[in-house]
Image (cartoon, coloured by chain):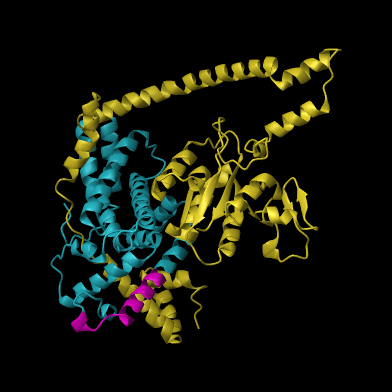
Amino acid sequence: MTGPEDHSDPTSTSPGHDEALLQAWRDGDETALTELMVSFQPRIWSVCWRMVRHAEDATDLAQDVLIKVMQGLPGFDGRSKLSTWIIRITMNCCLSHLRKQKLRRHASLDAPRGPEGGTRADRLQDVEPGPVQDVQRRDQHRALQEALLELDVEQRLLLLLRDAHGVEYAQLAEVYGVPIGTIKSRLFRARAALRTLLESSVSAAPTPESSDAGPREHDTA
Amino acid sequence: MINPHTNEQQCLAWIEGELDSEASRIFEQELQRDPELASRVQAMRRDRDLLQSMPVPPVPADLSERVEQAMTRPMLTGDRVGGPGRFRRRTQRSADHANWGVPIRMAALIAIGVGVLVVLVFFSPISRVLTGLHDENMVAHDGDVQNLMVLSDPRNTEAGTDGTMAFDVVVEDPVTPEPLAMVLHSESDVLPRLRELAKEAGGTLIRNASQEDLMEDDFVASSSGAGRPASREPSDAPVLSGDPSMAPSFDDQFRYADAGSVYTIAVPLSKLDELLVMLDDAFGTDGAVLLLQDHLSDANDTDWVRTLRAREAVSTWTRDTVDPIVILPIFQP
């Protein structure tokens, strides 16, 4: 179980152990699959949650990913690492989910919604507060969360996989099917875009008395 | 001064702390000469640190249970999956079946192939042509061969013989790709990005010929699309980039133009996946691929349903035997 302040890399824990569990399951150990799924749950969940920042959506997404993994596991040929394969499934599910939401938004004339459906307030309310060190740090995280939600979904995913989950360049290149140089270039663009969003949010921040949730001084770490 | 475009990988390495101490020292010396860039990359480094420290709520307690329930749902229809062990056995059986499936499919394909050959030899225009060669009373007219060639051209299978502009394409051949539509929710000039997209994917970008083009004296029609005089602006040329032989038929270009499409991209099926990935890259969620019929129909389903339907159709097209051309007229609603 991942706690609120669990920052361990959820995508690269003991790949040898994962492969051993997979082999054990293929050899007939029926508990190995359960163990494998349980070991991947925090990794999948954290990617899904960070992408959509909505508890119910993230749970649905994580469920979809786990089901797809279980359904696809018999056909997994081992040409890539198991974690790479699972990242790809997670990535596809997240992007598909966000695209669907955007298309639904195009087709719907409902009340104003956030970037991927749901109001911004709905999404941020779902953030577990966690034992953050101080108010400033919490504000920085809040500003970052808002900027991430504004960011292009592909860029958001790439940044999260690299920074929040520590996925190696080689693995990202394999997941995306592009050279490492392309990944680096995209990543740099994503960082620059995030920075621009954060800077613009600072310049557009309302006065403290008009908002208690706006991004403030996130750039002073 | 550091050029961020030529040194972005160095910046990235510094941001991520991947430069060794000497390289890092040199880089930081260079940064001192560009305070603006220094401030920016330092801020990017802090963003990264912040991202790494972002808290994540605990995994929902009921996630395993939900997955288990979803996996055992077929129990309601009599196909009990049970726990992971039963799932494993079931999928193992599926894998065993899959092993037998290859020879069975091959046998079925051979049988179908023989059947098709019999039909072609005895009942098709080929038989008339072939038998005509041996029959003194029959003459194989050039027209027979021409008709056969016209019918065998996949670009002509959609054209109505009565000259109508119908879109109700019936695709019986599973390897013939159904026409798609690329929908771009972008108000800016998309031409530069489309050029790049077509070029990178090894496809062809054309400006669809319209009925009005026919009224122009200097308009030249060719089998590969519409021809225009060289004096026109480059962006107004019919084939903007790529191989003209990939362009859709003239009739199709008219229909696409009538429906509001200015450009069309044509790619070999083998390159379609690459194109779709690049489309995502270039347009993000502002770009979608739909079945052409879906895009032009009045059906009351939502766009995301149409997107899924197109994706499902594309995923069923065989990519390893033949490499037909996929046509994607581009619409900007």
Residue A36 position in % (x across, y down): 24, 41
Which image quarter: residue B52? bottom left
Magenta segment includes A204: yes
Q: Colour of chain A?
A: cyan
- Is the C terminus of chain A in the top left, top right, bottom left or bottom right quadrant? bottom left
The answer to whether residue B102 is above or below residue A169 is above
Residue extent of the magenta highlight? A191-210
The answer to whether residue B192 is above or below residue B116 is below
B146 vs A66, left or right, is right
Magenta segment includes B215: no
Foreground residue, B205 or A112? A112
Residue A175 position in % (x across, y down): 41, 51
Outermost right residue: B136
Give the letter of the yellow chain: B
B164 vs B279, left or right, is right
Residue B265 in sight in this render: no
The answer to whether residue B295 is above or below residue B229 is above
